[in-house]
């Protein structure tokens, strides 16, 4: 019986990449696979902190072994910005990749 491991993501591409690395040793599950529809708050000041928040939430609420990541762009010329704010760098609602890229190029 394969051991189940949750990757706290709904990004299908990330899930596929990690599953390919793990091979058939582990049954890798996404947030969707375990029925988690919660938008887990990412309120930490670091990428590592946000990953810990996500994985801790899953373990506490679903009692499943879990790992998570949080990705962000850290630009040296901007003193590490946008960092944890990469997805929302341009402000506004949602995650507007085009607006974020334009703001980054102009900052």
Image (cartoon, grey):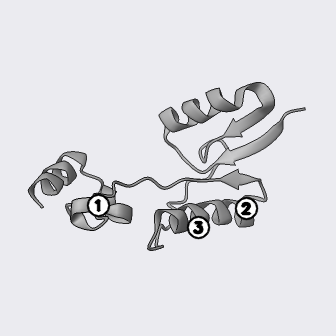
Number of residues whose C-alpha sits closer than 10 Å to that of mark 1, classed few (under 14), some (14–19) or many (20 or more): some
Q: Quadrant of residue 54?
A: bottom right
Q: How far separated are the C-alphas under marks 1 and 2?
A: 27 Å
Q: Relative to 41, does residue 63 appear above or below in the rendering?
A: above
Give the residue drawn at x 29%, y 53%.
95
For mark 3, give the secondary structure: helix
Residue tagged by mark 2? 59
Q: Relative to 59, does residue 26 appear above or below in the rendering?
A: above
Q: Give residue 56's position: percent from left, percent from top.
A: 67, 65
Q: Earlier in the sequence, mark 1 or mark 2?
A: 2
For mark 1, give the secondary structure: helix
For mark 2, give the secondary structure: helix
Q: Give residue 27's position: percent from left, percent from top.
A: 75, 34
Q: How far separated are the C-alphas under marks 2 and 3?
A: 10 Å
Residue tagged by mark 3? 53
Residue tagged by mark 1? 88
The quadrant the N terminus occupies is top right
Q: Give residue 22's position: percent from left, percent from top.
A: 70, 32
Horizontal side of residue 1 vs 66, given as left or right: right
Kindly give the residue lying farthest to the front in the view shown. 76
Give the residue drawn at x 73%, y 67%.
60
Kindly give the residue lying farthest to the left in the view shown. 106
Horizontal side of residue 79 vs 38, given as left or right: left
Q: Relative to 64, does residue 47 appear above or below in the rendering?
A: below
Give the residue drawn at x 57%, y 30%.
16
Give the residue drawn at x 67%, y 60%.
58
Residue in the foreground of this view, choosing between 89 and 38: 89
Q: Earlier in the sequence, mark 3 or mark 1?
A: 3
Labels 3 and 1 touching (C-beta < 8 A): no
The quadrant the C terminus occupies is bottom left
Horizontal side of residue 32 vs 59, given as left or right: left
């Amino acid at each position: 019986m394969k051991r189940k491991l949750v990757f706290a993501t709904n990004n299908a591409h990330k899930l596929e990449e990690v599953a390919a690395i793990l091979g058939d040793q582990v049954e890798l599950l996404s947030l969707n696979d375990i029925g988690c529809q919660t938008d887990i708050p990412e309120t930490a000041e670091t990428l590592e902190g946000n990953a810990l928040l996500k994985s801790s939430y899953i373990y506490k609420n679903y009692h499943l072994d879990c790992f998570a990541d949080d990705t962000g762009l850290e630009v040296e010329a901007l003193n590490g910005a946008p960092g944890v704010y990469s997805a929302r760098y341009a402000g506004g609602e949602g995650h507007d990749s085009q607006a974020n890229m334009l703001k980054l190029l102009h900052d």
